[in-house]
Image (cartoon, rainbow, N blue to C red):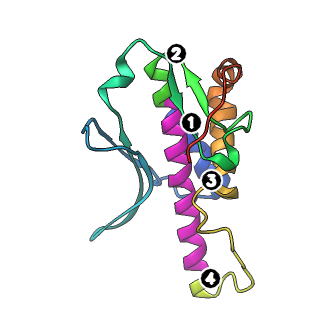
Amino acid sequence: MQADAMIAWARDCFGFHQSWQPKVRVSFDKRRKFSYGGLYFSNLGTSPGINLAFSDEIFEDTMICCLEYEHYATDPEIGSLYFLNWKQYVDAVLCHELAHAVQHSVILRLKINVKLGVLQNFKGDWQDDNHGELFQFCLRQFRREWMSELINLSYDVKVESLT
């Protein structure tokens, strides 16, 4: 996986400053069920980030499923995938959560610009839809560019979805 290339694409596509760099946290806490991607707020400001939650089970020699949400689970590029090893699974989760970090960074910029009056006619009904068009656009780009061979292999297996 080429995370640096994914970040460079996001900077170019959305005009983020060169300092735009998502922080990555990883947790193996058994109580954690989900990974997160988005923005982190602190007294120093707002920064993009992802927090990956993994269990020890991903290191077992079994097929791993990366489920996506029902409204796009069967999409050939961004839908649910099956993997033969944990490294491929980690790549898929990284793509998903990084897409959220990009999405929320764009939304924050739009909200600031609307507030400042720069975008007076912006409707932005999609802006808070967590798995909507902007998220799917980013996920599609990441998977197309950095996981296309795995997607073609994985999609031959039965597809499921998150509910």
What residue does disc 1 label? 5
**Which residue of the protein is positioned furthest toward the front in this rendering?**
163
- Which amino acid, by three-letter code, is at mark 3? Phe
Q: Secondary structure at mark 4?
A: helix
Q: Secondary structure at mark 3?
A: helix
Q: Secondary structure at mark 2?
A: loop
Q: Are marks 4 and 3 in contact (CB under 8 Å)?
A: no
- Which amino acid, by three-letter code, is at mark 4? Val
Sequence order check: which comes first, mark 1 or mark 2? 1
Position of 92 compared to 31: left or right?
Answer: right
- Which amino acid, by three-letter code, is at mark 1? Ala
Query: In the rendered image, which quarter is residue 121 located in?
Result: bottom right
Q: Which mark is residue 33?
A: none
Magenta range is: 91-113
Q: Main secondary structure of the magenta part?
A: helix
**Which residue of the protein is positioned furthest toward the top in this rendering?**
61
Query: In the rendered image, which quarter is residue 9 located in?
Result: top right
Choose mark 4 or mark 2, whichever is in front. 2
- The verdict on residue 17 being magenta is no
Choose mark 4 or mark 3, whichever is in front. 3
Position of 92 compared to 119: left or right?
Answer: left
What residue does disc 2 label? 84
Sequence order check: which comes first, mark 4 or mark 2? 2
- Distance between the Cα atoms at labels 4 and 2? 45 Å
Task: Give the residue at x 62% y 53%.
Answer: 135
